[in-house]
Image: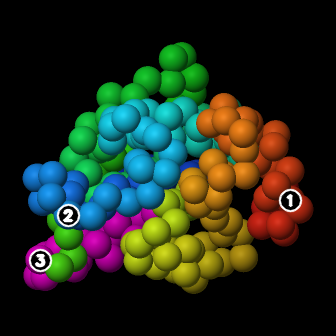
Amino acid sequence: QEVLIRRGAEPTQLGLQLRFGDFAFNGGSGDRRHILTEFNFSSVQEATVKSMACVSEFCKHLPQVSHNAGLCRIYFESDSTEAQAAARSWSAHGKLLFVQVPQEAPKHSARGGSAHLGSLAAVLGIAANPLVVTTRHGDFGSIIREMGPIVMGHGFRSLTLEDMLRTSPSFEDACDPLKLVHELDENGEYAR
């Protein structure tokens, strides 16, 4: 039931998880993950908006989307309330896109109790998508990538945002959907 509360009843085709670091939970203190420092994003909001724009371009090329009148549904999870707010307010500028963001504020699993259940529900919510894009560093993204094949079976595919950005000369190039489909095909990770 916790997963349904987080995700909602509508199925999504793509999961996006952004882990910014413990500072997102601790009011500015704690570790900062590579997604901000390595790729020169000026803020959590900028990283979220650009990541949403990137995966929305890719989402259009998923078979599940083309069979659904072009409607793409993205499920978003983050350790940052700022990122959640940016994802909720992100606009696809007239594209057929729906973004599902949990209403509950993120909690670090180190808090124990209901935070453990919330973390598990978040992992399952993201893993229950045919394609997920996660941040590489951190246990949360690793668990999602491990759980995906268990939850979705043979049709599960995953990418890390860092790998996409590292192999491209610019953010725009990293988000070119035709390039991404080609890269996934070469790696045997995407079957049309």
Residue at image location 24% in from the left, 41% down from the top: 82
Q: Residue 190, how many percent across, how many down?
A: 79, 61
- Specify the farthest residue to the top: 94
Q: Amino acid at mark 2?
A: Gly
Q: Secondary structure at mark 2?
A: loop
Front residue of this view, candidates 86 and 124: 86
The tag on residue 185 is 1
For the N terminus, the quadrant is bottom left
Q: Amino acid at mark 1?
A: Asp
Front residue of this view, candidates 155 and 37: 37
Q: Residue 166, how many percent across, how many down?
A: 66, 52
Cα gap from disc 1 to disc 3, whole angstroms: 40 Å
Q: Amino acid at mark 3?
A: Arg
Q: Residue 164, how many percent across, how many down?
A: 66, 52
Cα gap from disc 2 to disc 3, whole angstroms: 15 Å
Q: How busy is the neighbourhood of tag 1: few (under 14 within 10 Å), some, or many (20 plus)?
A: few
For the C terminus, the quadrant is bottom right
What segment is highlighted magenta in the picture?
A: 111-126
Residue denoted by label 2: 30
Residue denoted by label 3: 111
- Between tags 2 and 3, which lies in front? 2
